[in-house]
């Protein structure tokens, strides 16, 4: 535990996990230094649109599913004018935490505002463009760190935000040819991560206070993903008929109640790093296979990750304590 509250940056690669390759060296470098694991997510409802999936999975990550669904299981955005005043803000939930969201998805912007996030806009960072230019990685990293009170390698006494979430995915953020958008997002994420890690090297002021989380999701999934991306225990997979004899894995429980809608494959992948604060595990590459075999966290529900981050920012009690 640090002697001062950290400042959090969460990079969320929505739907990019399946596009990670050996050339994405900055992701693999982070994984080799970080504490890694899986985040389990619920099964998708039938006939879900891509836009609905983006908002629903973000709602899971920030533990706001009740704000997402109304009592009939429809999007709360359909009745947000009646319901928004009843939804606690992220600041109310986490001891005054000042949180911001940067995304280019219009539905996610609206949902973030309902949750009390300060929603930032690409055009506010890059002139009048809705999307960052291809060579703007250095500028973006500088802007993100400045929002968190890191300027020119130094820590300022105060910051505009305690936590900043950057959402990149579905080809929203890059002006590239149709069909190459996701690949462009993946390259952009890798490059951005490299700049941030360079600024937060061990021994630097930024490195001592920046709590960095990288979350990579699989986006739309199918039954074909189940056998190759399963997070079930080996014993269960070998003997499913004896499943009642094995204890339930912790990610399938919420308190004393079972989570009956959890997807047992295609989890989100997470790596968290802060110099001298996070515990390094045995992972060497940012990949599903390496995480499953060597990660320190194994699997936790995705709706618990924001609580873990808020604890590092001194804005929540320790999850599980």
Image (spheres, rainbow, N blue to C red):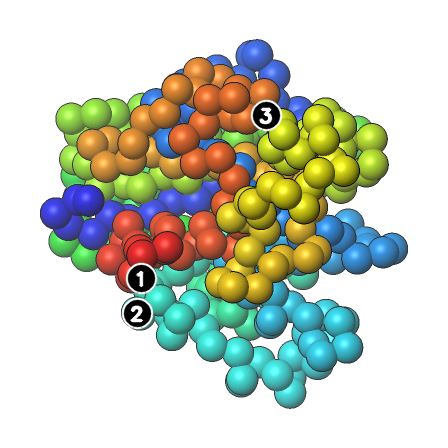
Q: Nearer the viewer, mark 1 or mark 2?
A: 1
Query: Quadrant location of residue 179?
Result: top right
Q: Which residue is mark 1?
A: 316
Determine the residue positioned at 20% across, 32% down: 276
Q: For the C terminus, give its image quadrant.
A: bottom left
From the viewer's perspective, tell me whether residue 165 is left or right of residue 263: left
Along the viewing direction, whichever of 246 and 316 lies nearer the viewer: 246
Query: Quadrant location of residue 132?
Result: top right
Residue sitting farthest toward the right: 47
Determine the residue positioned at 21% across, 25% down: 202
Tell whether label 3 touches label 2 (CB within 8 Å).
no
In the rendering, which numbered label is found on residue 168?
none
Determine the residue positioned at 61% across, 83% down: 83
Q: Is residue 193 in view from this perspective? A: no
- Secondary structure category for the residue under label 3: helix
Q: For the N terminus, give its image quadrant.
A: top left
In the rendering, which numbered label is found on residue 95?
2
In the rendering, which numbered label is found on residue 288?
3
Q: Nearer the viewer, mark 2 or mark 3?
A: 3
CA distance for labels 1 and 2:
7 Å
């Amino acid at each position: 535990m640090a002697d001062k509250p950290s400042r959090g940056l969460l990079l969320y690669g929505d739907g990019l996990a399946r596009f990670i390759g050996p050339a994405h060296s900055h992701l693999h470098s982070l994984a080799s230094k970080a504490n890694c694991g899986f985040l389990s997510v619920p099964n998708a409802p039938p006939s879900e649109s891509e836009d609905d999936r983006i908002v629903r999975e973000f709602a899971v990550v920030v533990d706001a599913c009740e704000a997402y669904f109304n009592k009939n299981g429809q999007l709360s955005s359909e009745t947000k004018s009646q319901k928004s005043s009843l939804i606690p803000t992220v600041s109310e939930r986490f001891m005054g935490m000042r949180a911001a969201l940067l995304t280019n998805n219009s539905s996610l912007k609206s949902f973030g505002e309902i949750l009390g996030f300060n929603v930032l806009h690409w055009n506010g960072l890059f002139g009048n463009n809705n999307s960052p230019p291809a060579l703007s990685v250095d500028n973006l990293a500088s802007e993100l760190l400045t929002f968190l009170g890191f300027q020119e390698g130094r820590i300022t006494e105060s910051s505009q935000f305690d936590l900043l979430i950057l959402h990149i995915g579905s080809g929203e953020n890059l002006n590239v040819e149709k069909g190459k958008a996701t690949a462009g997002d993946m390259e952009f994420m890798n490059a951005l991560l490299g700049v941030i890690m360079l600024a937060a090297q061990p021994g630097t002021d930024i490195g001592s206070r920046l709590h960095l989380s990288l979350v990579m999701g699989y986006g739309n999934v199918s039954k074909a993903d189940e056998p190759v991306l399963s997070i079930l225990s080996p014993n269960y997979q070998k003997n499913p008929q004896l499943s009642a004899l094995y204890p339930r894995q912790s990610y399938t429980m919420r308190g004393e109640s079972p989570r009956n809608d959890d997807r047992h494959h295609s989890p989100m992948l997470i790596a968290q790093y802060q110099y001298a604060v996070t515990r390094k595990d045995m992972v060497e590459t940012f990949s599903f296979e390496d995480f499953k075999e060597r990660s320190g966290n194994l699997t936790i529900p995705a709706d618990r990750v924001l609580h873990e981050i808020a604890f590092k920012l001194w804005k929540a009690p320790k999850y599980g304590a």
